[in-house]
Amino acid sequence: MPASDRASSINQWVRMLRMIADPVRIRILQLMESAGRPALRVGELSEALKMPQSTISRHLKTLLESDLIEARRQGTSIFYRPLSTRDTPGLKELQRVSHKVLRDDDQLQADISRLNKILAQRQDDDIFADTAPEWDSIRGRWFGATFQYEAMLAALVPQWVIADIGAGTASLSADLAPHVHRVYAVEPSPAMLKAARQRLSNCGCSNVELLAGSMEQIPLPDESVNAAIACLVLHHVEDIPHALQELYRIVMPGGFVLIIDLLPHHIDYFREKMGHRWMGFKPQDLQQQLEAEGFAFDHWNALPSRTTVWKDTGIRVPDIFVMRGSRPHAADL
């Protein structure tokens, strides 16, 4: 080893020994090592050592400047812990010797005992301990019951154009509108269009355009939207293949269609009273139909079962699935 390097190592070792040659700093280092993973605050060290915080802060500053400990800010608090032994040559050996010499020291054992109680109290003071059972309700009162879903809508590309097929009263269109360039709300029912117009007027969704039309005759040009969403509408359609052809026609290459509908069920009420033409769909069958019309199947998921029962009829609401298919680019065909 070159003489300059040997001198540097000697000086570093002497400096390190000089820094810990103080009873308070030794106690601080031993407490930090005994704490293990948790980093410690000034107040916790002050309470464990029975010393003023100003005294502890002064010694922490010296240890920081000597590269024996590190500090990190978390919120309004600063936490301290020993620097990694990998970053400070000799520190590991120094810790080993100190532990061997001081392991039976009464004062140090008393320090550690007080610190253990402080760390246990830190866990008891967890602000979420008492609120966890009611956390969803508390957060909902502050921010609303659906804010997380609204936040996820922000993942949509702002330049997108989306078609809401079978838009009904345009509730979905109104949710999408703040996050995309334009929404086309396509709906065949005059009564629904009237209700949708009122909703959109109330929410000020100027980028939603209402269009009278069905899923089998969508009044939009070819390749005019980035995505088309058919939410609980396909079961009303007579000609499924033609409806899927229409979706394929209006979606740009690279765009996608999202179909939300019912899984197979045997509830006649929906056919007799709600005008359903189809008693739900097997996702595997619908996947084959999507692929037959040119879509590349992406995935499907069954939404969590709600086991909701209508009080007035005793009917259990069918389960819902969501399916996504993409229109490939010409180069991918």
Image: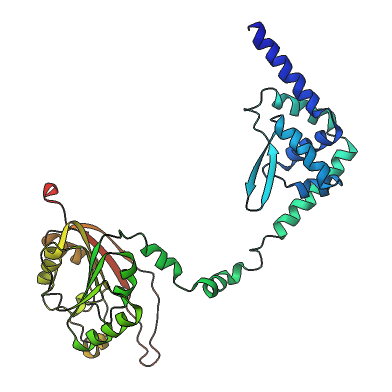
Q: How is the image coloured?
A: rainbow
Q: Nearer the viewer, residue 109 or 143?
A: 143
Q: Residue at x 76, y 22 (%)?
A: 15
| 95 over 282 or under it: above or below | above
* In this picture, residue 180 sits left or right of residue 291: right
For the N terminus, the quadrant is: top right
Q: Residue at x 85, y 41 (%)?
A: 109
* In this picture, residue 330 sits left or right of residue 299: left
Q: Nearer the viewer, residue 303 or 12?
A: 12
Q: Residue at x 27, y 86 (%)?
A: 195
* In this picture, residue 148 sits left or right of residue 272: right
Percent coordinates x, y for residue 170 in the rendering: 28, 78
Name the residue furthest bottom.
312
Q: Quadrant of residue 134?
A: bottom right
* In this picture, residue 155 sits left or right of residue 86: left
Q: Nearer the viewer, residue 73 or 37?
A: 73
Name the residue furthest right.
106
Q: Quadrant of residue 282?
A: bottom left
Percent coordinates x, y for residue 329 in the rendering: 15, 51
| 5 over 116 or under it: above or below | above
Percent coordinates x, y for residue 323 in the rendering: 26, 64
Percent coordinates x, y for residue 40 in the rendering: 72, 45
Tag count: 0
| 317 over 104 or under it: above or below | below
